[in-house]
Amino acid sequence: MVKTHDWGYLAASSHYVLAKEIKFSLQEGDIEDALEGLDELIDSMSKIAIREMRSHLLIIMIHILKWKYQPQKRSSSWRKSIRNARYEIGEVQEETPSVTKNIIESEWEKVFQKAVLDAADEMNLNKQEKRKYNPEILTWEEVFEKEYYLEDED
């Protein structure tokens, strides 16, 4: 008797349960079913890694926008957040090699638009300041390479 699984449901519910069901399919000799489960597991884990990367990219972008638009409020905690988020993205890429520079760049515009809104909220901009606040998209260099220092820049 061949057991068919709703692999998508299992992947959304629990990777642990999904892995156990894949193992069960293998033990039952249903290689095709197990391969479908593995494909779903791989796809689900990749989506989680990309979501994690987007979250860290958002943090970097918010802090850089605040850094640029509120220089008088710069703090070491902003620097630390930028550095930590960069580190975490590096970890995601190391653990999930499919999260490449191309994948990050494909998410760039969407994440940036959210960062613009979130940074504006965090900066407590008034109505007049919000009208003037229209940042240019951040570059790769600004997000991943530039060092930020508390001393005056530029």
Image (spheres, rainbow, N blue to C red):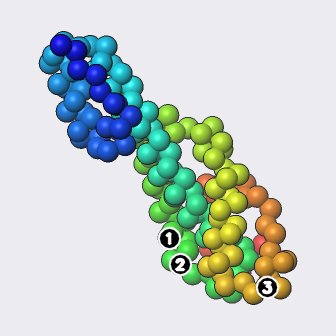
Secondary structure under the numbered disc 2 in the rendered image: helix
Q: Residues within 10 Å of mark 1 (few under 14, many from 20)?
A: some
Residue at 47% in and 52% down: 52
Query: Of the residues tagged 3 and 1, which is closer to the observer?
Result: 3
Choose between 107 and 36: the one closer to the eye: 36
Residue at 51% in and 69% down: 81
- Looking at the picture, does residue 69 appear above or below residue 52? below
- Looking at the picture, does residue 129 appear above or below residue 153? below
Sequence-earlier tag: 3 or 1: 1
Q: Quadrant of the N terminus?
A: top left
Residue 129 location (% of width, % of height): 80, 83
- Looking at the picture, does residue 74 appear above or below residue 141? below
Q: Is residue 72 left or right of residue 129?
A: left
Choose between 7 and 68: the one closer to the eye: 7
Q: Are marks 2 and 1 in contact (CB under 8 Å)?
A: yes
Residue 90 location (% of width, % of height): 48, 48
Secondary structure under the numbered disc 3 in the rendered image: helix
Q: Is residue 9 left or right of residue 125?
A: left
Choose between 132 and 102: the one closer to the eye: 132
Q: Which residue is mark 3?
A: 127
Q: Amino acid at mark 2?
A: Ser
Kindly indicate the quadrant of the structure image that contains residue 21. Answer: top left
Q: Residues within 10 Å of mark 2 (few under 14, many from 20)?
A: few
Q: Which residue is mark 1?
A: 80
Q: Amino acid at mark 1?
A: Lys
Q: Which residue is mark 2?
A: 76
